[in-house]
Amino acid sequence: MIVYYYLHENGELIEKPTGVVDSMGPFDYFDSPFVVRRWLVNPDVNGKNFLKEAAKSGANPLNIKTIKELWKLQ
């Protein structure tokens, strides 16, 4: 499973399916003043790094915990 996540200016991590984002192109889709940062994530490959980067970028700790549990990451 590969998905996009973006960090909203309010600190929430929001998941977007690749098909939705790719229909516009990732640069166009996330071209918005409320998008702080975006990631293309494969939980099995870069899930832990994504969550570390998201935390450093100011993501809501509860979002990070929820995603970590969902993906069964230690």
Image (spheres, helix red, strand yellow):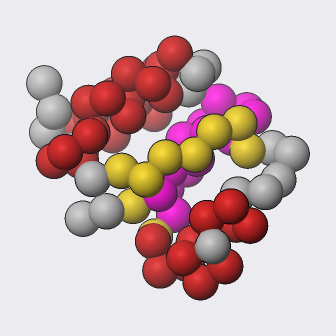
Q: Quadrant of the N terminus?
A: bottom left
Left or right: 32 in relation to 70: right
Residue 30: x, y in percent? 70, 57
Left or right: 2 in relation to 9: left
Report the label total.
Answer: 0
Residue 17: x, y in percent? 46, 70
> Residue 29 lies in what quarter of the image?
bottom right
Chain part drawn in magenta: 4-16
Residue 60 visible to an observer of this rendering? no
Q: Nearer the viewer, residue 63 or 26?
A: 26
From the viewer's perspective, is residue 44 above or below residue 58?
below
From the viewer's perspective, is residue 57 above or below residue 21?
above
Which residue: 16% across, 47% down? 44
Residue 6: x, y in percent? 58, 47
> Residue 74 lies in what quarter of the image?
top left
Residue 63 visible to an observer of this rendering? yes
Which residue: 54% across, 76% down? 22
Residue 24: x, y in percent? 67, 79
Which residue: 43% across, 53% down? 40
Q: Nearer the viewer, residue 47 or 59?
A: 47
The question of residue 13 being in magenta is answered with yes
Left or right: 42 in relation to 37: left
SS majority, magenta: strand
The question of residue 19 being in magenta is answered with no
Left or right: 23 in relation to 54: right
